[in-house]
Image: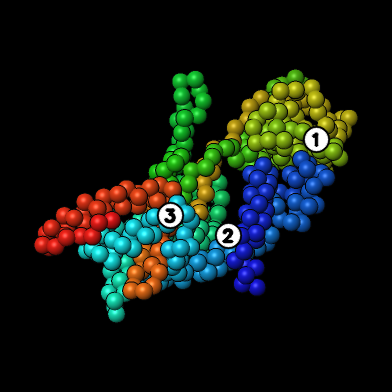
């Protein structure tokens, strides 16, 4: 089981599946109503709903793949770490000098002789090239281990650790993050679920460019806790406000069409014309025993497949008001009145009701679209990203090189020269170092007052 969870094949398969799902989640709008998917994806709406692709990144399928990928990375790291610590401590599996490739036997023989004759000289030259050198002598045996660029040895593990932290942060976000949409008009106060405070919108303003397009939205909000204003802050786009673990973002703005006030022009049978202001849901008396009520207002009137009125958007593209007139409590008129097309109406009329109505004006209060969000997984994600960056830096810019030589009387020397990257360049560096060996040996021997054998 551990072998399966730590296999490279599993990692590749999981990555491919996660990438495919991420592409689907990018192309498919998230968080919409079931009717949206039935309308725009009629043949796939059942699959989208069944697999929870409408909130894909929190779906059991995506979270299961992410968890499996997390286990794969953890087991891969656990599998490799002991071997690398042994390598770092100098517990090395040597190759006999005779077992080296032909073009590297010279390196094995040259460094073995140098270690046997002048170990201190070899250590000094290696340290000049930024190697950490350790020489041990015991019972006539000499062992040298020289290393440099140790961060490069653990670069992949740092990358794995960063990915592990990022995935854990993502799972925390999937299970514990909050997204609370708020649509507030000026003066409106709402309570937040699970919190002891409420939010009030004190003022909402919209800045425009000279051409009339929207430049910025600003919401002045107050945090009210136990009846007291604890804090007041202006929120702008890309300038959120944080309070008690929640970040408040300025997301949008719009019109509260449920509180629309319209102005109707009414002409009675005598030809008298008067204007009447009425809000949605309000009932007013227009004549003795005759009442008018504004039942509904749709900013962008349309009809669905069954011929029922629906709002196509929140923009005022085709405003319409649903009017009901009653006489002595009994409905005698029910019809839609259109702002742009006053001659088009869907109505039930009573023949003796002789009134003509038209929609002259309409206005709705602006609301500020805010979002209160908490994401406890964000800090782990940032930490993981930093660790991942350091791991990539270590992997690509720190080349771990290791030189190990063991010599003893009457035995073949043992030799190891390895590099995680640029193996050929590492061998070339050792060859240049070996070329300086005769001069170094003679100079060192002269300092000690003795001669060195010819090589």
Say which mark, if any, is on residue 303.
1
Q: Earlier in the sequence, mark 2 or mark 1?
A: 2
Q: Secondary structure at mark 2?
A: helix
Q: Residue at x 26, y 50 (%)?
A: 436
Q: Which residue is mark 2?
A: 174
The image position of residue 389, as x and y in percent, is 43, 51
Q: Residue at x 52, y 42 (%)?
A: 251
Q: Which residue is mark 3?
A: 104
Residue 188 against residue 4 in the figure, above or below: above
Q: Secondary structure at mark 1?
A: strand
The N terminus sits in image quarter = bottom right
The C terminus sits in image quarter = bottom left
The image position of residue 282, as x and y in percent, is 67, 42
The answer to which of 244 and 95 lies nearer the viewer is 95
The image position of residue 346, as x and y in percent, is 83, 32
The image position of residue 21, as x and y in percent, is 67, 50
Label 1: few (<14), some (14–19) or many (≥20) C-alpha neighbours in 10 Å = few
Q: Earlier in the sequence, mark 1 or mark 3?
A: 3
Q: Quadrant of residue 277?
A: top right
Q: Secondary structure at mark 3?
A: helix
């Amino acid at each position: 089981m551990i072998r399966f969870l730590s296999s490279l094949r599993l990692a590749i398969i999981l990555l491919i599946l996660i990438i495919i799902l991420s592409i689907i989640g990018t192309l498919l709008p998230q968080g919409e109503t079931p009717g949206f998917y039935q309308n725009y994806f009629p043949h796939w709406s059942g699959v989208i709903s069944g697999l929870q692709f409408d909130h894909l990144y929190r779906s059991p399928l995506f979270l299961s793949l992410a968890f499996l990928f997390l286990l794969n990375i953890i087991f891969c790291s656990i599998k490799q770490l002991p071997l690398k610590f042994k390598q770092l401590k100098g517990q090395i599996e040597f190759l006999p000098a005779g077992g080296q490739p032909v073009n590297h036997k010279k390196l094995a023989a040259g460094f073995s002789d140098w270690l046997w004759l002048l170990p201190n000289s070899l250590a000094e030259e290696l340290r000049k090239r930024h190697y950490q050198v350790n020489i041990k002598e015991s019972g006539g045996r000499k062992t040298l281990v020289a290393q440099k660029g140790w961060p490069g040895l653990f670069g992949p593990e740092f990358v794995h650790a960063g990915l592990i932290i990022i995935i854990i942060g993502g799972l925390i976000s999937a299970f514990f993050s909050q997204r609370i949409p708020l649509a507030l008009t000026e003066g409106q106060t709402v309570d937040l679920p699970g919190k002891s405070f409420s939010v009030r919108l004190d003022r909402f303003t919209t800045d425009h460019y000279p051409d009339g397009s929207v430049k910025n939205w600003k919401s002045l909000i107050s945090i009210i806790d136990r009846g007291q204003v604890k804090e007041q802050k202006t929120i702008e786009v890309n300038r959120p406000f944080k309070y008690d673990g929640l970040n408040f973002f300025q997301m949008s703005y719009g019109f509260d069409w449920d509180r629309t006030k319209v102005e109707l022009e009414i002409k009675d049978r005598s030809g008298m014309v008067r204007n009447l202001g009425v809000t949605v849901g309000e009932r007013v008396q227009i004549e003795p025993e005759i009442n008018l009520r504004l039942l509904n207002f749709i900013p962008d009137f349309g009809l669905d497949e069954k011929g029922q009125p629906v709002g196509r958007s929140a923009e005022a593209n085709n405003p319409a008001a649903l009017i009901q007139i009653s006489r002595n409590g009994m409905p005698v008129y029910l019809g839609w009145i259109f702002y742009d097309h006053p001659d088009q109406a869907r109505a039930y009329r009573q023949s003796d009701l002789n009134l003509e109505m038209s929609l002259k004006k309409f206005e709705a209060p602006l609301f500020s679209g805010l979002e209160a969000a908490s994401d406890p997984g964000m800090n782990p994600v940032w930490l993981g990203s930093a660790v991942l960056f350091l791991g990539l830096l270590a992997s690509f810019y720190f080349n771990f090189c290791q030189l190990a030589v063991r010599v003893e009387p009457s035995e073949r020397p043992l030799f190891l020269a390895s590099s995680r990257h640029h193996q050929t360049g590492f061998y070339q560096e050792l060859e240049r170092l070996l070329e300086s060996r005769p001069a170094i040996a003679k100079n060192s021997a002269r300092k000690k007052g003795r001669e060195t054998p010819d090589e």
